[in-house]
């Protein structure tokens, strides 16, 4: 896939407060979660804070699932840091304190085998095309992404969404020249919602989370890609027992219900 950046063609769209909040969540991971100060004991209020590093495409669903977990476990507080999987992996290698990690692909998790315990796939996903509301360019398939009158934004191949996108385009034999390559799938979604590109490849769940800010073009399941989210405790987790409990809980029915409702597929 060729990736020669072109000048984007901006259009005016009003970005609603909800999407802006999501963007801020993605672009500014919680420094409290990744900085120093994670202790093995309980906090001043008696609750144990468990830090979770998670792929940006899980921002909405894990925030909701985390609230449900805390209701069932009042002695535990979950603190999330959402970013691209490759950024999370870099944080782990740098030794920043956290308890568990959830990536958007198995390759990133496999590369962390020396820093994590065994991983468990907690959810699956697939790709879709996101366009401006109303789909003004008439993008109906991957072939349309190769049109000269359609500006396309993709995730960088260094992140899972970018690798999945490249795999999908190669499978369909489509050559796309993106106007930009973004550091996360949520950044791709934001570019489309802001009118800075006509279309982009995102996860189905991300397109759904944006509501009427984007139009989602589904892709055939038999020619789509298999997106998997593995979760694993970190070897140096300050709270290993709690980390293992969170991962186990993500496989229970309350968590699976939240995942299904958000459009994720179960393992």
Image (tube, rainbow, N blue to C red):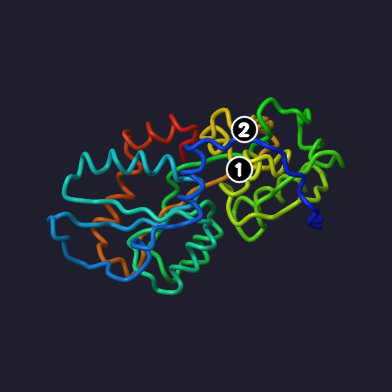
How far from the left and from the top, in percent, is residue 205?
53, 36
Left or right side of 134 for 150:
right
The residue that disc 2 covers is: 214
Left or right side of 237 for 144:
right
- Which mark is first along the chain, 1 or 2? 1
Please, which residue is most extreme toward the right here?
148
How far from the left and from the top, in percent, is residue 38?
27, 67
Q: Residues within 10 Å of mark 2 (few under 14, many from 20)?
A: many
Q: Residue at x 58, y 35 (%)?
A: 207
How far from the left and from the top, in percent, is residue 198?
73, 38
The residue that disc 1 covers is: 189
Q: Secondary structure at mark 2?
A: loop
Q: Residue at x 81, y 35 (%)?
A: 144
Q: Residue at x 16, y 50 (%)?
A: 75
Left or right side of 65 for 154:
right
Question: Where on the picture, by quarter, is residue 233?
Answer: bottom left
């Amino acid at each position: 896939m060729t990736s020669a950046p072109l000048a984007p063609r901006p259009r005016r769209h009003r970005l609603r407060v909800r999407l802006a909040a999501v963007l801020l969540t993605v672009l500014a991971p919680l420094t409290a979660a990744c900085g120093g100060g994670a202790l093995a004991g309980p906090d001043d209020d008696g609750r144990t804070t468990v830090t979770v590093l998670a792929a940006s495409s899980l921002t909405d669903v894990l925030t909701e699932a985390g609230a449900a977990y805390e209701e069932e476990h009042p002695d535990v507080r979950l603190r999330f840091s959402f970013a691209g999987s490759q950024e999370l992996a870099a944080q782990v290698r740098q030794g920043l304190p956290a308890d568990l990690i959830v990536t958007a692909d198995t390759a990133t998790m496999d590369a962390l085998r020396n820093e994590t315990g065994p991983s468990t796939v907690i959810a699956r996903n697939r790709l879709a095309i996101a366009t401006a509301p109303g789909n003004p360019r008439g993008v109906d398939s991957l072939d349309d992404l190769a049109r000269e009158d359609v500006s396309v934004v993709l995730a960088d191949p260094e992140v899972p969404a970018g690798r999945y996108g490249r795999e999908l385009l190669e499978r369909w034999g489509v050559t796309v020249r993106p106007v930009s390559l973004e550091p996360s799938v949520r950044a791709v979604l934001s570019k489309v919602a802001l009118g800075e590109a006509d279309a982009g490849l995102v996860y189905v769940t991300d397109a759904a989370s944006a509501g009427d800010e984007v139009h989602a073009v589904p892709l055939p399941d038999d020619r789509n890609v298999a997106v998997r989210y593995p979760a694993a405790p970190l070897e140096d987790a300050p709270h290993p027992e709690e980390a293992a409990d969170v991962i186990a809980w993500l496989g229970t029915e309350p968590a699976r219900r939240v995942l299904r409702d958000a459009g994720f597929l179960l393992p």
